[in-house]
Image (cartoon, helix red, strand yellow):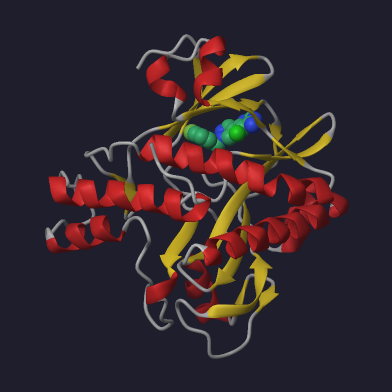
Amino acid sequence: MSLPFELVAQGKVREVYAVDDDRLLLVASDRVSAYDHVLPTPIPDKGRVLTALSVWWFEQLAPVLAEHGAEHHLLAAGDDLLASGVPAELTGRSMLVRRLEMLPVECVARGYLSGSGTVEYQRTGAIVDVPLPAGLVEGSRLPEPVFTPSTKAEVGEHDEAIGFAQVVDAVGADRAEVLRSLTLALYRRGAEIAEQAGIVLADTKFEFGTAADGLVLADEVLTPDSSRFWPAMTWSPGAPQPSFDKQYVRDWLTTSGWDRVSPPPDLPEDVVAATRDRYVRAYEQLTGLPWN
Ligand SMILES: Nc1ncnc(-c2cnn(Cc3cccc(F)c3)c2)c1Cl
């Protein structure tokens, strides 16, 4: 796809283009990643579903942002993008956003113990400087949601968990405090809405930037790519929880005999179709809106 804009950042499944000095275009692809590899087979509509979900969450979270004197970066999405020169085939999976000075902190909120959090906890009984009770296992619900920030790793590297003191060093004490309280408030609101939809929001990662008028919630929000979504029905601490959206892909890759090092194999049609269905159902269950 050739866009009349300069490519300024390229992620595994997303790109960022510069529309002008003040605006960026975030474009979500149909690519899916699993086990740290981008798979060769696209999932039709994934980019459009996750973009529509982010747009919906920005609306749901606006009151929480306002309570903390913050805003979000979304300017326009969907057909409104045609006026900015975005090709029609991209408008459904693009967001026009305010260009911000991004803060160098990944603001992670966890309501459950999982992934790198579990590894940290098993090593130290805590997640960096966040103490946790004894006896927790993979998938355990935490007594309270916790703020467990990390640094933004280089492309291809994993983010490194950091303590609150390092957030203070990076952004100052007052802003660090706001980042923690706002991250936790946004997570609580998201988890509350997800719970009503039968989905556990185990954890999520927010990114913030600054503009002249203060703190701004950026990037994508509360999507299955930036968060762990588990079906509430199957939640059972003590083992890795099935991912709401990626479990079919993970299971098939495991049975396919792929060694997780060489380039991943193509996905069979039924796994692609089932995965597309999971993204559509996540959208419909969370928003209560029909996907079309
Ligand atoms: N509002 C903003 N202002 C300035 N910069 C950004 C920004 C740059 N990069 N990223 C992360 C990212 C998002 C998608 C695809 C990628 F490759 C990388 C976010 C944003 Cl969202």
Q: Foreground: 146 or 167?
A: 146
Residue 87 falls left or right of residue 203: left
Q: Where in the image, quadrant-wise, is ligand 1 located?
A: top right
The location of residue 235, given as percent across then percent down, is 42, 76
Residue 203 appears at what percent x and percent y?
54, 62
Towards the viewer: 212 or 52: 52
| Residue 145 vertical position relative to residue 97 in the rendered view, above or below | below
57 or 31, which lies in front? 57
Q: Quadrant of the rendered structure where residue 47 is?
A: top left
Residue farthest bottom in this picture: 135
Position of residue 221 relative to residue 119, above or below, is: above
> In the drawing, does residue 47 fall left or right of residue 20?
left
Number of callouts in the render?
A: 0
Where in the figure is residue 45, as x and y percent of width and height?
34, 36
Q: Is residue 12 visible?
A: no
> What residue is at 59 percent from the left and 23 percent from the top?
24
125 in relation to 74, above or below: below
